[in-house]
Amino acid sequence: MAASPGYWIFWLSIMMYLTPSGHSEDKTLEMIAAPYETIVLPCKGLIQSVTEDLHVSWMKMRAKTENNLLVYGFEKGKPTNKHQAYQFQNRTEMVFDWSGSWVNLTLKDVTELDSGVYQCQIYNEYGHWTQNITLSIKDKTWNVTAAPHETAHLPCKFPIKFGTDDLHVSWVKMGEKDKNLQVYGFKKQKPANQQQVSQFKDRTESDLDRSGGWVNLTLKDVTEMDSGIYRCQGYNANGSWTQNILLYIEDPKGRSHIFIIASVVVILILVTAFVC
């Protein structure tokens, strides 16, 4: 006699119950972002609501000789970021998507320091899930254009605490054969311009915006000689960073020359037509 549909449904339910629901995701996702963008790192488990037994942790993995960095933690129905690494403070949010059981991490204002492997772990009554994500921050050269004798503002950003004696910032103009020109220096909370080249003397300022992490350079009364690639470099106890900026000084004379040449060509055409 053939078994009834209810028989198979019963045993299928038993097998599903006995099968472990938690698992580790072997595949490492790869994600790419540009500097200062906001990136969303995905992580999925069997989650239907926030329960007391739900634990979620996001870690940035480091070498075996170093401790991993806590990026974001969640347990007992609320964030637990007491031990969150300073690098990630005020830059993270976790978004629950109950329809798909996602616990995605939003990481704001990324820099090259954020590159690396992130691990998401989820625990609840249904099991344990792990997801690894490799985040790469692609290099980006900023373009800045200014007219002669204007003031140019070159941006540089680093989301790490300022105001410490170990903060060092240097601006250089890149030259041929590694002969870079010192534009501006900052060390121990004050300018350090002993090696500043004469081309930039009395024309530079650095604006430190501690709330946003900017260490912008102001370059006054620019000329064509200031065109080129500038590099902002900085470091302190928490890390180091580099930002390249391409400064282009417009050439009004060049546009005038084009206008004059075009006018001469038109006149020659008219004269030739009249003579013929």
Image (spheres, rainbow, N blue to C red):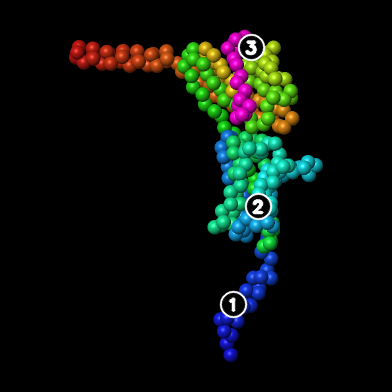
Counting from the top left corner in percent of width and height, residue 217 is at 59, 20
The residue positioned 67% from the left and 45% from the top of the image is 72
| Residue designated by label 1 | 9
Mark 3 or mark 2, whichever is nearer to me: 2
Counting from the top left corner in percent of width and height, residue 123 is at 69, 56
Amino acid carrying label 3: it is Val
The residue positioned 60% from the left and 59% from the top of the image is 48
Amino acid carrying label 2: it is Gly
Q: Is residue 232 above or below residue 194?
A: below
- For marks 3 and 1, give the CA distance: 82 Å
> Is residue 233 visible from the viewing direction of this image?
yes
| Residue designated by label 2 | 77
| Residue designated by label 3 | 197
Which contiguous range is marked in magenta?
198-215
Q: Please rate how many residues cluster around mark 1, counting C-alpha atoms within 10 Å: few if below 14, some from 14 to 19, many from 20.
A: few
Badge 1 marks a residue whose secondary structure is helix
- For marks 1 and 2, give the CA distance: 35 Å
The residue positioned 61% from the left and 19% from the top of the image is 206
The residue positioned 26% from the left and 16% from the top of the image is 269
